[in-house]
Amino acid sequence: MSIQQSVASDHQLVRLLQIGVVLEEVVEARAAKHANTDDLDDNVRAFLREAAAESATHRERLDTLVDGLEADTIPFDEIKLLVEQQYEADQDFDGILYDQLCNEETAYKFYDDLIAAIEESDASFGLDRDHLLSVLREIRADEEAGVEEVTELMEERA
């Protein structure tokens, strides 16, 4: 996902933050599902559980920003059910790590683009711009660290 233009209004910002919430919900649900897969090594299982918990934290932080703009998000249970019903990931070790790498990279790119779009904007938002950018930069840094950690796990297996 790429954000092609600057963020011009609270309405547009809410929609983008809601996309981030859904993205985190999908990552959380996938990581939690994969963590319960049989025959995973302990390091991978621990990483997946940590990734699910981190996504839950990111989701909560984004929800707080959305609440500050007086909008609603999609409940996590609805997204989790959708993922469980329609998502059929390759369950072997490399498939699980590759899936997680794609999730982490997608999230990193989304937050990187969102931050750039907000920085390029001269719009006033219903949230403090510095706080908004600080939260998004922290989440982006977590996603970047997740990409690095998955890559290291994959390299250990090579």
Image (cartoon, helix red, strand yellow):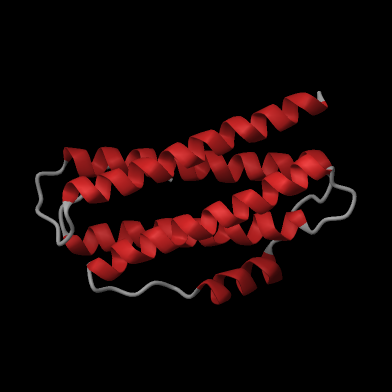
At a point 79% along the width and 38% down the height, the residue shown is 94
Q: Does residue 62 sit above or below 69 in this rendering?
A: above
Residue drawn at x 81%, y 28% is 157
> In the figure, is residue 46 to the left or right of 75?
right
Observer-nearest residue: 155 or 131? Answer: 131
Across and down, in percent, residue 126 comes to 15, 62
Q: Is residue 42 visible?
A: yes
Q: Residue at x 29, y 41 (%)?
A: 115
Quadrant of the frame with the C terminus = top right
Taking the image as shown, residue 10 lies to the left or right of residue 1, namely left
The residue at the point 79 percent across, 59 percent down is: 36
Left-right relation of 34 to 132: right
Outermost residue toward the right?
A: 39
**Does residue 141 lie above or below 83 as drawn?**
above
Relative height, residue 5 to residue 68 (above, below) = above
Res 70 → quadrant: bottom left
Dividing the picture into quadrants, the one containing residue 41 is top right
Q: Position of residue 9 (x, y in %)?
A: 16, 58
Residue 37 position, x and y percent, is 82, 56
Q: Is residue 27 visible?
A: no
**Residue 120 in the image, given as x and y percentages of width and height:** 18, 38
Q: How many marks?
A: 0
